[in-house]
Image: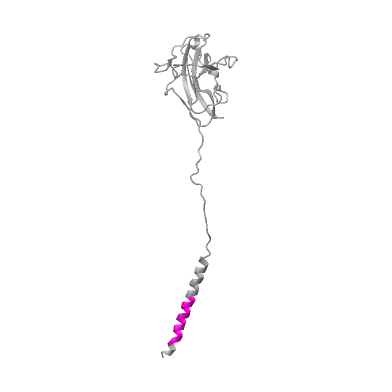
Amino acid sequence: MGKRRRPRARTAVGALIAALVASSTTIFVASYSAFTATASNASDAFSVGSVVLVDDDTNSSMFTTAAPGTGQVSAAGLKPGQFVQNCIRVTYSGSLPATVKMYATAISDVNGSGGTGTVSYLHTKIEEGTAGAFGCTGFAGATTIWDTTTHGGVASDLLGVFPITYATGPSSALASWTNTAFRVYRFTMTLDPATPDTSQGASATATFNWQAQNS
């Protein structure tokens, strides 16, 4: 009976040999893995340039018909031939060179007791200086960029026909603005001597804007 059990032992030995052969084959295949290497250029960064303008008015109007604050000028009760004058400083802090122009928006007119307004009789002169501040302290180095001489023609300097877009607005005398560049603008507003009696009690408002575009 014991001699008949020996073939089973051979079968077990054969299975063990087959397993060892299979294991050897697996090791042989793994030894052919490829070598690799990687090079990296990390943390690449990109930023968009900027065009930035600020002014020194501290959210105050240059001209007011109410009680004037610091640096403001009273433009209440104007009479024909009278003028008012004030300045504002505009500074550039963008990273890209820019072309600066100015224009007006929100021009409005309230007729006087006789049915006539003011914007058609209010002359606008703008000078660009190289020194000064809001209120015109220390204003100097003036170049006229808007008046009847620089823009000749009938009624060309009147508030009612002042440019209302960047494309048509007067350009700064400084062709290209770069970071920290600034200019001071002096406004002289004159009520025409020929303003009719029908404009008595009339009023006008306007917003003057400076816009920078990358050149």
Q: Hey, which residue is sitting farthest right in the picture?
A: 153
Q: Is residue 12 magenta?
A: yes
Q: 69 or 194, which lies in front?
A: 69
Query: Where is residue 50 drawn, in percent x and y?
Result: 50, 33
Query: Where is residue 109 drawn, in percent x and y?
Result: 49, 18
Q: 14 or 137, which lies in front?
A: 14
Quadrant including the C terminus: top right
Quadrant including the N terminus: bottom left
**Magenta region, mostly helix, strand or loop?**
helix
**Quarter of the view holding residue 64:** top left
Q: How is the image coloured?
A: one colour
Q: Is residue 199 visible from the viewing direction of this image?
A: yes
Total residue callouts: 0
Q: Is residue 114 visible from the viewing direction of this image?
A: no
Which residue occupies 50% across, 73% down?
22
**Quarter of the view holding residue 162:** top right
Q: Hey, which residue is sitting farthest bottom in the picture?
A: 1
Decide: is 182 above or below 41. above
Decide: is 106 above or below 195. below
Q: Is residue 1 magenta?
A: no
Query: Where is residue 122 drawn, in percent x and y?
Result: 51, 14
**Quarter of the view holding residue 134:** top left
Q: Which residues are magenta?
A: 5-18
Decide: is 179 above or below 119. below
Query: Where is residue 71 drawn, in percent x and y?
Result: 42, 18
